[in-house]
Structures are given as C-alpha cells and as structure tokens.
Amino acid sequence: MRFEHWQTERVLFSAIQFAAMTDVAVNLSTIDALVSRAAAEGAEVTVLPEAAMHDFGAPDLPLGPVAQPLDGEFVTALARLAARHGITIVAGMFERSDDPHRPFNTLVALDPAGEIISSYRKAHLYDSFGYRESDRLLSGPAEPVTVAIGELTIGLMTCYDLRFPELARALVDDGSDVLLVPAAWVRGPLKEAHWSTLLRARAIENTVYVVGAAQTGEHYTGCSMIVDPMGVTVAALGDEEGTTSAAVDPERIAQVRKLNPSLANRSLDRKTSPARHAGA
C-alpha cells in the first residue's frame, strides 16, 4: 500500500460544557462567557452541547413554542460572538419545522465571520431508556452532513446518533477527519461508561478525532472529552461547567492510518475511493 503524506496546520478545538436552562437569554450569557474563555485560550473551533439554546426541560414541556428559525435570536447572537472572536462555533438548538408541536433538534455551524456554513437535523431520536424524544421532536434525514473548516472536514452528529456506527462511518466515507458530537447525555446506570466507550469506539474504528461536548447538571452526565484516532482521551472534563481543548493534528491522523489502515483494509460496503489519509 502506498502511503500519501498529507499536511496542514493543527487546529485547536474546544469542547464547551454547561447546564442549559429553559431561558434562552441566560444560556446566551453563559455561552458568551465560555466561548470567550475558549477563544482567549487560543481555540479556533468551539463545540457547544445539544440543546444549548434551550434545555429539553420536563418531559411534558412543549418545545414547538420555544423553537427558532436559523435566522432567529439565538443564531444571530452566536453569529455576533463568532465574528467578535474570529472563531468557528457549533451549537445545538431547536429549529422550527412545519409541525408547530415538534421542531427539529438541530446543530448549526458558524464560521469566524459569523456566517452559517452548515446545519444538521438529528436523525436518530432518543426513543430509548424509557424516553421518547420523537413525541416532542421531528427527525431529520438520515444523511451525513459534513462541513469544511480550513483543510479539515468535520462530520456532524448529535447525542443518540453516537450509538449508530453506520452514521459515523458514512461521515468518514465523505472525508471527515473529525466527528463532532454535541450531546445532552442523560444520567443513569452505566450511562457515563456508555458515553465514554462509544466516543472512543467511534474514534478507533474510524481513525479520526472525536469531540464530545455534553451538557452537565442534575440530569446529564457531563464528561465532555476529545479523543484522538487511537482512542486516547487527550482532553476531558468531569461534571463541572467549563471548557477543555486539544489540537487536532492531521499528522497524527496520517500516522495512525499508516499503522492501522483499517479503513483501507475493509471489504464490506467499502466505497471505491479510499479515505484520503490511507493512501491507495
């Protein structure tokens, strides 16, 4: 197998962890402070949790009335924040749909100029562990969504999507070097272990970086982390509010894919064009 050396600059990613409220203004104030802290520490890409705009709240809380369009107050505030710091922001929100009672669970990505560069509507709704997210939200299409950040390709996933390895593999087949996983991972027996194990598994099996940015607080696990392509946790938080950062190093991806060319070696459902780091 021929190995192709691929070079670009390291990019500093920051996973931001906090407990979102059911008050958009309060959440925006918290986001402003934490993104500003991450930017001051040199972060170039900040990843906020699922439902960063407005928490899920009680199971009987209607989410339709609190949902916003992509040009609404929440995204407009994020755009100003991204432009102020010259930083990329990825965040979770509830996006209005044609169903007034069930919005989409959406990730929005904004570039350093404050422009929307991509959005992803969560495909796998959390109808599990006794909860039914589909009663309150609509699912998006089960199609991989990637976004270019500099010379890196970023794949977008949300929370429960992490339990579906086929989505992660589709994102990598579309060129993803990093998987971003904003989440509100619900507390419960073994749930922290599931979260950390699945983040590492998606990194190892796809030889990519994975950034998990989770909500914390009474109902969620916290434990945000950044995992490298060998499954090594290179940055992490416990249950505290805060930020944790690590550099995504394309050279590390290339080294791991030379050592462990599993993407190039697979024989089941392999696309005709190999992953770019693996060579041909």
Image (spheres, rainbow, N blue to C red):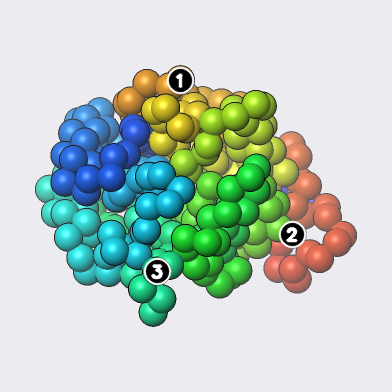
Residue 129 against residue 174 in the figure, above or below: above
SS class of the residue under badge 1?
A: loop
Pointer 1 local density, CA inside 10 Å: few below 14, some 14–19, many at least 20:
few
Q: Which residue is under mark 3?
A: 101
Residue 8 against residue 214 in the figure, above or below: below
Quarter holding the C terminus?
A: bottom right
Q: Earlier in the sequence, mark 3 or mark 2?
A: 3
Within the image, what quadrant is residue 243 found in? top left
User: In the visual, does 230 lie left or right of 21?
Assistant: right
SS class of the residue under badge 3?
A: loop
Residue 270 point in image, percent of width and height: 79, 64
Q: Which residue is under mark 1?
A: 238
User: In the visual, does 280 lie left or right of 46?
Assistant: right
Q: Earlier in the sequence, mark 2 or mark 1?
A: 1
Q: CA distance from mark 2 to mark 1?
A: 41 Å
**Residue depicted at x 60% and y 59%:** 124
Indicate which label's residue lies in the foreground, 3 or 1: 3
Of residues 120 and 93, which is closer to you in this image? 93
Q: Residue furthest front?
A: 60
Marks 3,1: beta carbons within 8 A: no
Q: CA distance from mark 3 to mark 1?
A: 35 Å
The tag on residue 113 is: none
Residue type at the position of mark 1: Gly
**Residue depicted at x 43% and y 22%:** 239
Residue type at the position of mark 3: His
Marks 2,1: beta carbons within 8 A: no
